[in-house]
Image (cartoon, helix red, strand yellow):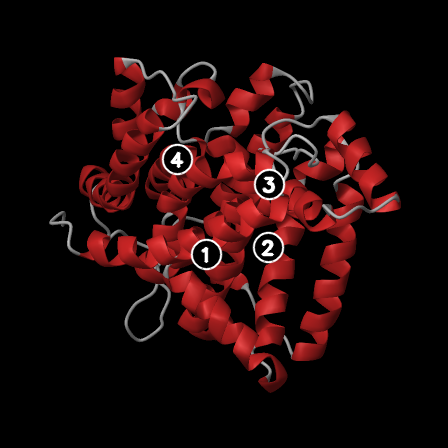
Amino acid sequence: MNHQLLTRTECKAMRGLAIIGIFMHNYCHWLNPVVKENEYQYFQSNTDWFRQVLSAPDELLPMHLLSFFGHYGVPVFLFLSAYGLVMKYETSADGQSLQRGRSGLEGVFSFMQHHYKKLFKMMILGFVAFTMIDLMTPHSHHYEASDIVAMLGMFNNLLPHPDAIIWPGPYWFFGLMLQLYLVFRLFIARRHWSWTVGLMVICVALQFCFGPESEELNRYRYNFMGGMLPFGLGILYARYGRPMDLKTHAALFVGSVFMIFWFSMSFIGWTFVPVFICTATISLVKLFSMRPFQHINKALVWTGGISAALFVCHPITRKIFIPLSRQGDYYAGFLLYIVTSVCLAWAFREIIKRIPIK
């Protein structure tokens, strides 16, 4: 196990890249002329549409790319969460492995309580602010009492038709993350690597039992099974990864980008795209640490520092500015959304720090 596989700065830069993809994707894919993604289900029509816009690019090409690929910031967050869990719970102060035994590892209830509070502290401010803005703007969502309880309890992913009841939509991530914390504590923490690999294989294999466009696949991928591949990869990388030189990272980045595009063209390949998203992100961040890219790296690190706040607040600004883009001023609305989201995220970060939840 190597502490320097990813430094704190590099992890922040990776979070910065991930949140940029997520919050820009979550705006672009709401615009009718823009290509739609394959996130929870695989629609061949979306892939064909993406091929078409690549063969005949228009002025919305940047939005097409962000809409189609931006949601892959989620696997990067899952990878980093798993990496962080190993560093925290499986490594001693002197860097030695703690994969054997349970000393220093909280009980299941205490572990889950701690991580639920951490997620709740992040979510609650954004949820309260969003519901007020949502009710004051056109086309507000109709909440059922059970939906609100499920949102606050972070078990809404388990309910039927999760994409219809989770609002704002990006908050499905909190329920997913809580499930993965439980999986880590019960089946992965300080256990043999075969537990992690076994879970990855089982979850991927079961996914192939569902139709590419089926509601069953949609519900499956809304839960921990759909995120087990990048999460497990983060566990294995933290335990067994080895440092590589910059030339290797450059080659890995180019190869990963090629695989991302190629594998996205089929249902089977699409299942494994998160692996190459993670390797591409790691390599890109390593390359950005070079002197010529230091300004880009600093910007990514800063963005990574507000990533949690940006995640919870961007649905608010999207609801406000999306009508402007839908009226035809695509980039005007998009730029206003970006600027206000970043500024609001900075303010949210300061408020979240002061929420008295320990």
Q: How much space separates mark 1 and mark 2, taking CA atoms?
A: 27 Å
Q: What secondary structure is marked by label 1? A: helix
Crowd rating for badge 2 (residues with CA inside 10 Å; few <14, some 14–19, many 20+): many
SS at badge 2: helix
User: Alpha carbon of mark 2 to alpha carbon of mark 3: how far?
Assistant: 22 Å
The quarter of the picture where the N terminus appears is bottom left
Q: Which residue is mark 4?
A: 171
Check disc 3 and report its element: helix, strand or loop: helix
Marks 4, 1: nearer the viewer? 1
Q: Residue at x 72, y 57 (%)?
A: 256
In this view of the protein, can residue 291 be seen by the observer?
Answer: yes
Task: Check disc 4 and give the amino acid type.
Answer: Tyr
* Residue at the limit of the structure toward the bottom, as seen here: 291
Res. 233 visible in picture: no
Residue hosting label 3: 28
Q: Is residue 283 left or right of residue 305?
A: right
The image shows residue 76 at horizontal and vertical percentages of: 52, 52
Q: Return the disc, 3 or 4, that comes first in the chain's sequence.
A: 3
- Crowding at mark 3 (Cα within 10 Å: few <14, some 14-19, many 20+): many
Q: Which mark, residue 278?
A: 2
Q: Residue 354, labelled with which disc? A: none
Q: Residue at x 61, y 42 (%)?
A: 329
The numbered mark, 2 or 3, whose residue comes first in the sequence reads 3
Q: CA distance from mark 3 to mark 4?
A: 17 Å
Amino acid on which the number 3 mark rests in the picture: Cys
Label 2 sits on what residue type? Cys
**Disc sitting over residue 339 in the figure:** 1
